[in-house]
Image: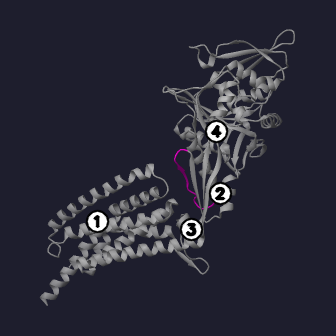
Amino acid sequence: MRDKKSLFKNVRVIIFILALLASVVLIHPGYNSEEGLNTNLNYGLDLEGGSWLQIKLQGALVQVDADPEMIVSQLVEPVISAPIQVTDSNLDVSGVSSSDRYLTFTTSATVSASQLELLDLGSVSVDKLSQGTTQVTLTTTKETLIQAYLAKAFDAEVLPISTEDGTVYEIRAEASEEEIEALMEKVGGTILKNEDGTSTYKEGVSTDTRDLTRDILNDKLNSLGLKDIPVRTVGEDYILIDFAGIDLATAKDIAEKPGKFEIRIQTTGNETQHVLYGDSIVSVGIPSYHDNQWHTPFTLNEEGARALQKVAIDTGATDYPESHYLNMYLDEEKIYGAPLSYSAASRLKETPIYSWEASTGTDEAAKTEAETLQIHLRAGALPVNVVLVGSGHVDATLGKQFKTEAVIAGLFSLLAVAAVVFRRYRRPEILVPMIGTSVSEVIMILGVAAAIGWQLDLAAIAGIIAAIGTGIDHLVIITDEVLYEGKLPPTRVFVSRIGKAFSIIFGAAATTIIAMSPLVVMGFGALKGFAITTIIGVFIGVVIARPVYGVVIKELLEVEGNGSQESTAD
């Protein structure tokens, strides 16, 4: 008769026991008189109760053309309160690089470079001519001028997107085709047409903007120390947010409230001095790579630019920039720090700087940091205007009822499976390890969910039930393959049959994972949760639980067979 302790010396069994114990620790089940049973598991909206919000991203994508000279007149004349006269321009000349394009105008008004830099028309050079005339040279492009014109008209960010068909302007605010057409007529322009004669105007935003909005919301909401708040995109223009355990009024307040962004400058040692808050940042650009560095551009308003200049001069940062870091904080947590560049320090001695770039480095990690900084710089301020198009609330009592019913459904399915298995084999030594294996798989699935903070909802529970069914199928395959006329075959035959069983199981598991993978990538909400839970369940079963079942069933049936032989001999 074999040593019964040999089962616990098997490496697969040891790994199985350790994984099971780790899962129990991660789930951390407990009980108190007020809340009853509690764990480290996160429950979704339909099991916990709470609120949900659906928001629509407002924007427009359009291709337009316009007269750059008329745009400059429209933007500059109201600022300087005097007419201008364009004297030279090469913006419409083909073959000229963007760095060499310019537009020059003269005016009788007194003009400063800092005054015009606020218009974001490009680089500004101001020269005093004779007879009280001022000459201004803009190093710019037609795309930059159109971008500035649309941004001024709609009081919103406008992003030029280069495509094979030309430049598409993304207006990050509500903008109708009629409004854009009327604006372009004022500057000698129009909305361009596609090759088939249809308008290039399209309501909505780009995929990048949609994803950026989702990331900003996700970063802001999940930095508040609340339960994990899933933020999901629905189609191209909608975002759905679930606030489990949070009432509707609080959910709306959380979603609309921006984070606290602050820039402070290092004075002496670890001491810092306040410079400005996030409301001084008027725009945040897309990270770009130039001068062998990744940079995240942002623009300050008049008040913020002058505050930064004053503090930099007062603290000596303009004289010794390497000793005075500019540190950025989001909700009092430091997210970035770097010294002023020598060129910026030199310019700050003479004039405030409105356009800044935060450099992060040269490698892929620096690129990721630049993209993350873009999100942080907004401090929860979304890149586009949004409108609430739907909201709802799930009562906590109803959520608790769903949770109870989901547990009952899981237990009922397990009992039903147990009944079918017992009817098929009528042998407790097969039924007990089979059901025990299924229960252990469920515990390990919940352990993984607790470890990664995955929210369990009704779809996830359905995925667990599906994993139970798939697991039982695989265990039946193992049992049928290894039994020979109701008992274990010789060892050599057993090894052959268990190998055949697992070849079938691995093939079936791979098919399930491949079938579910598209739902993980392309699905959202319930479909994605169901697919992820099912894949986790199948993976845990195939890698950890089912090989152990093969070891255990062999051990138990061998013990049973040896016991029967000894009784017969007696």
Q: Nearer the viewer, residue 467 or 70?
A: 70
* Extreme residue in the right direction: 131
- Name the residue tied to disc 4: 172
Q: Which residue is mark 2?
A: 224
Rendered location of residue 16, percent (x, y): 37, 67
- Say what amino acid the circle numbered 4 marks: Arg
- Residue ID at (67%, 16%): 102
- What distance separates the C-alpha of mark 3 from that of mark 4? 35 Å
Looking at the rendered image, the quarter that the N terminus falls into is bottom left
Tag nearer the camera, 3 or 2: 3
> To which residue does mark 3 refer?
48
| Mark 2 neighbour class, 10 Å CA radius: few under 14, some 14 to 19, many 20 or more | few
Cα distance, mark 3 to mark 1?
Answer: 33 Å
Q: Nearer the viewer, mark 1 or mark 4?
A: 4
Q: Which portion, as a residue range, is magenta?
A: 224-236
Q: Which mark is residue 474?
A: 1
Q: Sequence order check: which comes first, mark 3 or mark 1?
A: 3
Q: Position of residue 29 (x, y in %)?
A: 51, 73
> In terms of depth relative to the viewer, which is nearer, 296 or 44?
44
Q: Is residue 226 above or below residue 152?
A: below
Q: Could you tell me residue 349's position as x and y percent?
A: 80, 28
**Do callouts 1 and 4 mark residues in contact (Cβ within 8 Å)?**
no
Q: Nearer the viewer, residue 459 or 301?
A: 459
Residue 103, x across and y down, in percent: 70, 16
Earlier in the chain: of badge 3 and badge 4, it is 3
